[in-house]
Amino acid sequence: MSGRPDPEWDSLWDSVGAGEKPRRPASSERPASAGGPAKAGSARPAGGSGGAGSAGIGSPSVAGRSSASQATGGPAFIVRTDGAARGNPGPASLGAVLIDASLPGASRPDAPPIATISEYLGVQTNNVAEYTGVIRALALAEELGARAVDLLLDSNLIVEQLHGRWRVKDAKLIPLHAEAKARLGRFGRWSAAHVPRAQNKQADALCNEAIDRVQAGTGPRVVVTRPK
């Protein structure tokens, strides 16, 4: 995989209506909802599987299907995403990992990804960051020719809203929800299941990396890795 700044994501930013463009926050701000202390450096896989009662890739809560022409052909990806806001609202970011679903152990929390996203979002709420993470991951999956995606998310709110079981009441989330549903409709098959936060440590680490590198002035706002 190769990691590099990706200016093309700027146009995608405009399409999701996620609020103001990113700005650098004060370095004194501390995490409030990023799933633990921030860690600099490369994303590290989670060690071990989650606890009982978690939804795995073999039993997603509901599968969604579209009539898109992508119903056949192309790879299937397991997608884990996360969003973080240190302050809620506060300095926010997203992280996502895409895993080849055909590989042995692909549903394990520590399965090696074939593509990743780590992006700083500026000042946003946690839910905006979570939804934007899903949208960015779906855009990358589509770019890589996916025919199917299985979302494993630690945001039960997003899972329930994607399946239409919960209403989208927050005005900031309405366009993001619409964008996510539109992108899901382009795949031949999709599913979304809730998993414990402990199973999403790879995506969480990418969130923290994004905030840390921008606050420290040591890296770009967006880092995307793709298969070589």
Image (spheres, grey):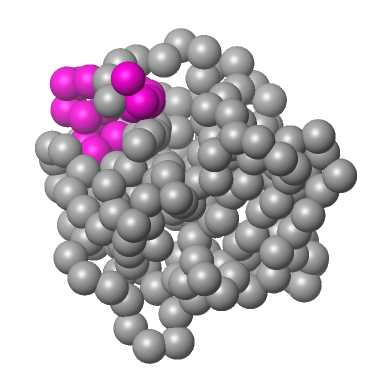
**Is residue 213 highlighted in magenta?**
yes
Q: Is residue 174 above or below residue 72?
A: below
Q: How many marks?
A: 0
**Is residue 50 highlighted in magenta?**
no
Residue plotted at (33% across, 43% down): 113
The residue range painted magenta reads 209-228
- Give residue 120's quadrant in the image: top left
- Image quadrant where one finds the N terminus: top left
Residue plotted at (67% across, 32% down): 17
In the rendering, at what x and y percent does residue 27 appear? 20, 36
In the rendering, at what x and y percent does residue 182 appear? 77, 40
Q: Is residue 226 above or below residue 78?
A: above
Residue plotted at (36% across, 26% down): 227
In the rendering, at what x and y percent does residue 118 appear? 35, 35
Residue plotted at (18% across, 65% down): 47
In the rendering, at what x and y percent does residue 140 appear? 52, 30
For the residue pair 67 and 4, the one nearer the viewer reads as 67
For the residue pair 100 and 12, the one nearer the viewer reads as 100
